[in-house]
Amino acid sequence: MTPFRRMALLLGIPFLACLAFLTLTPSRVENAMPNLLDLALRAAHRLGWESLDFTRLEVLANVLVFIPIGILAVVLLPRRFRALAWLIGPAVSAGIELAQRIALPHRAATISDVLANSSGATIGVIAALLLSLLFTRSGSQARSSKLETS
């Protein structure tokens, strides 16, 4: 395993544990941390984002929280299985929503959450692939310029 993948795994495990805690515990985030959500909304309103309400904040949070899922999928999957990265975010999200529906009756399992989460994971996959291309090209250009000078 490359050092980069090892680092992604070391960061990914606590991230996934936090994600599980946020999504698979009986209490909803807005009940567990109401002050944090109020602070976020007030800060956004002070910055001029008056149209941000709780519903939009929740959708935005769902998108943002799943971006790392897409990045981790690209980084951790072997290159030959990288196409599966597109499916991991939606699968994780659907699994979370299904678990909420079956085992956590106080949680709201919705298709809109799956769509927002999947959008975030897709953004993560795209970002990771673009960065991978960028670093691969810059690395190969550096190697070819070294060969030319020798």
Image (spheres, rainbow, N blue to C red):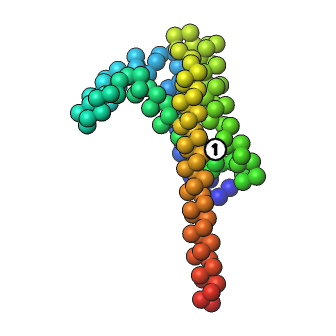
Residue at the image point whose x is 60% and y is 58% from the top: 132
Residue in the picture at 41% in, 26% down? 56
- Label 1: which secondary element: helix
Q: Is residue 44 toward the left or the right of residue 10 in the image?
A: left
> Is 73 situated above or below 63?
below
Q: Quadrant of residue 111?
A: top right
Q: Dividing the picture into quarters, in which one does residue 13 lie?
A: top right
Is residue 25 in view from this perspective?
yes
Other-residue count near label 1 (Cα within 10 Å), few / some / many at <14 / 14–19 / ≥20? many
> What is the x, y in percent for residue 81?
74, 48
Residue 69 in the image: x percent, y percent?
Answer: 58, 40
Name, please, the residue furthest toward the bottom: 150
Specify the farthest residue to the front.
Answer: 51
Q: Does the image show residue 9?
A: no
**Toward the viewer: 10 or 136?**
136
Which amino acid is tagged 1? Answer: Ala
To which residue does mark 1 refer?
A: 73
**Up/down of 135 relative to 45, above or below:** below
Residue 45 placement (x, y as % from top left)? 26, 30
